[in-house]
Amino acid sequence: MNTAKYDLVIIGAGVAGLSAAGYGARANLKVLVIELGGSGGQAQNIVSLENYPGVYPAISGYEFIENMKKQAISFGAEINNTEVLSLDKKNDVFVLKTSTQEITATSLLLATGSSPRKLDCPGEIEFAGRGVSYCATCDGPFFKNKKILVVGGGDSACDEATFLSTISDNVTVIHRRSEFRAQKAVAQRVLDNPKINVKFNTVVSQIQGNNKVESVILKNTITGTQEEISVDGVFIFVGAKPRTELMPFIKHDDEGYIITDENMATDIPGLFCAGDVRSKTFRQVVTAASDGAIAAHSAEKYILSLKNKAYN
């Protein structure tokens, strides 16, 4: 097994990871980004990125990510599509192993993002891929002119419901609370959309069907009454679960998100964290990019401190 050495290794090629890659490479660090799947994380599923400062008119999340990737590579960063099988720290060096090589790094950034949370209701797992989906831009076209249910009340749920309303005139959004928690402008678009029917104080009790989704049982959280409605697709956007499997022992908050200081540093020297996997109050593309830039700068300072060349 061959060995490669880097100044900064970034696990995750989403917005935070690619932002860090660009800043790190521009600082003359030898940077490697490792990503098992395709680049972009959840951002690549954004239909229209309209609230990133300076990006106007809006572009797709996919196009935005491709630009970020090309930019980072142009600065000298490397991107490797593989899986990290193990991760350890020996003295001041991080050691990562993939199926083909051993990688050492002076500093390490976790930008692994998050994965969609599940409802954990009967039928959800059974009908995954057969009417149950967690990505409207991925699966929405399969439900053209069909009955669609969207579950959730945050930015993602409202954005995806708006997108799905361009595919079908029959979209229902349910949220367990009495009002959306999405940004006001995003939520208002849903409330004003004649193609979208909104039900507050409502949850899914069960997803039903034979070979595919055919209906759902909805429960009113205030009255306890239940109703069955016919649907062809159930799109679930009820938050995310941080992906911390590689280092589950890192200090985290009650929801599992990794705790850092304002420099993106964890409680392990040389280990930084950025993006949606990090504990913070606001998760947006712009905050992920900011996290990544700060993390790369902090990694540079950390590396220089090991060489006794620290600066403020």
Image: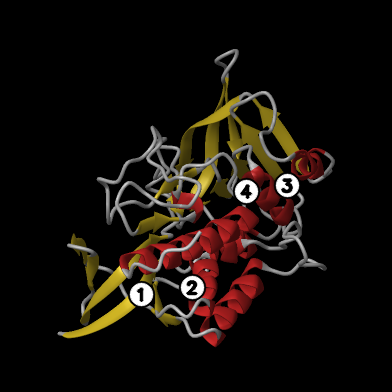
Pointers 2 and 3 in contact (C-beta within 8 Å): no
Q: Which residue is mark 3?
A: 170
How many angstroms separate mark 4 from mark 3 (CA)?
A: 19 Å
- Mark 2 or mark 1: which comes first in sequence? 1
Q: Residues within 10 Å of mark 1 (few under 14, many from 20)?
A: many
Q: Does residue 36 appear anywhere in the picture?
A: no
Element type at marker 2?
A: helix
229 to 74, vertically: above or below: above
Q: Does residue 8 appear anywhere in the picture?
A: yes
Q: Residues within 10 Å of mark 4 (few under 14, many from 20)?
A: some
Element type at marker 4?
A: helix
Element type at marker 1?
A: strand
Q: Which residue is mark 2?
A: 24
How many angstroms separate mark 2 from mark 4 (CA)?
A: 30 Å
How many angstroms separate mark 1 from mark 3 (CA)?
A: 52 Å
Q: Which residue is mark 4?
A: 156
> What amino acid type should be assigned to the residue bearing mark 2?
Gly
> Would residue 61 be found to the left or right of residue 4 on screen?
right
Question: Observer-nearest residue: 295 or 256?
Answer: 295
> What amino acid type should be assigned to the residue bearing mark 1?
Asp
- Mark 2 or mark 3: which comes first in sequence? 2
Q: Which residue is mark 1?
A: 7
Q: Quadrant of residue 2?
A: bottom left
Q: Which numbered mark, 1 or 3, is in the foreground of this view?
A: 1
Q: Residues within 10 Å of mark 2 (few under 14, many from 20)?
A: many
> What amino acid type should be assigned to the residue bearing mark 4?
Ser
How many angstroms separate mark 2 from mark 3 (CA)?
A: 47 Å
Question: Observer-nearest residue: 87 or 138?
Answer: 87
Q: Which numbered mark, 2 or 3, is in the foreground of this view?
A: 2
User: Residue 53 in the image: x percent, y percent?
Assistant: 75, 60
